[in-house]
Image (spheres, rainbow, N blue to C red):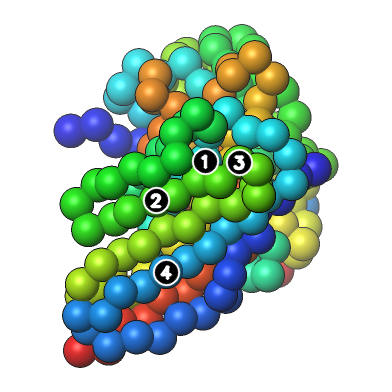
Amino acid sequence: SQQGEEDPQALSIQEGENATMNCSYKTSINNLQWYRQNSGRGLVHLILIRSNEREKHSGRLRVTLDTSKKSSSLLITASRAADTASYFCATDATRYNQGGKLIFGQGTELSVKP
Amino acid sequence: EAQVTQNPRYLITVTGKKLTVTCSQNMNHEYMSWYRQDPGLGLRQIYYSMNVEVTDKGDVPEGYKVSRKEKRNFPLILESPSPNQTSLYFCASLSGGNEQYFGPGTRLTVT
């Protein structure tokens, strides 16, 4: 089955810097989503980008999607210590866009130092 | 408040002792699913349900059962737990906008 692969696996930056995480996948998708997970807790949905969209913004988050390269990136601008978490991309490739079945990447562990 | 709840949050049990992890959502979502999260393997879907009385296997269904008798509840059943089912489990429900709402997780240890 397809899988999102994320890069880098771990990222350590200083507060105020930007953080960029990348995700690649293997097959055609309906949409791609990014989630955040604080240590050992539930995942929180951050942003969804549909296959016909190229860029989306939400607050300090910017997501791009390149379906020709089967890749996406998540940019967090002006990072804060509270952004420290694991970030996962997830792809929805269910037939007829039934939704629901997501394939998750391995995640990027982001550490933002004060 | 819109939420997905799971119980228990932590459970230590012994091999072979049947257990149930409950999941409930208050958002009237039709689609619900269970995932397990393991280091190095990420999140993998165990079972999902597209509506009441409609369930299907995900990627790693062996050793698990589910039921969906009511829209809000989607319990995960381990009839005979084994140590390889030690994991962090998440229940999730799907909104009309295709985003998943996750529960807080259940950390299960099987000795």
> Residue A23 or B25: which is nearer the viewer?
A23
Tell how many labels: 4
Drawn side of residue A95 relative to residue B52, left or right: right
Q: Given the image, on which type of amino acid does mark 4 rest? A: Thr
State the SS at label 4: strand
The disc, 3 or 4, on the residue closer to the chain's N-terminal end is 4
Answer yes or no: do the residues labelled 1 and 2 have beta carbons within 8 Å?
yes
Query: Who's the residue at 59% across and 64% down the image?
Result: A6
Where does residue A24 sit, x and y in percent of width and height? 64, 55
Q: Disc 1 designates what residue?
A: A32
Where does residue B24 sit, x and y in percent of width and height? 40, 30
Q: Residues within 10 Å of mark 4 (few under 14, many from 20)?
A: some
Chain of residue at mark 2: A
Q: Disc 3 designates what residue?
A: A67
Where does residue B8 sit, x and y in percent of width and height? 44, 50
Drawn side of residue B83 relative to residue A53, left or right: right
Residue A42 visible: no
Q: Given the image, on which type of amino acid does mark 3 rest? A: Thr
The disc, 3 or 1, on the residue closer to the chain's N-terminal end is 1
Cα–Cα gap, marks 3 and 4: 18 Å
Chain of residue at mark 1: A
Question: Do pointers 2 and 4 mark residues of a single chain?
Answer: yes
Look at the image and tell me in which quarter the C terminus of chain A lies.
bottom left
Residue found farthest to the front: A68
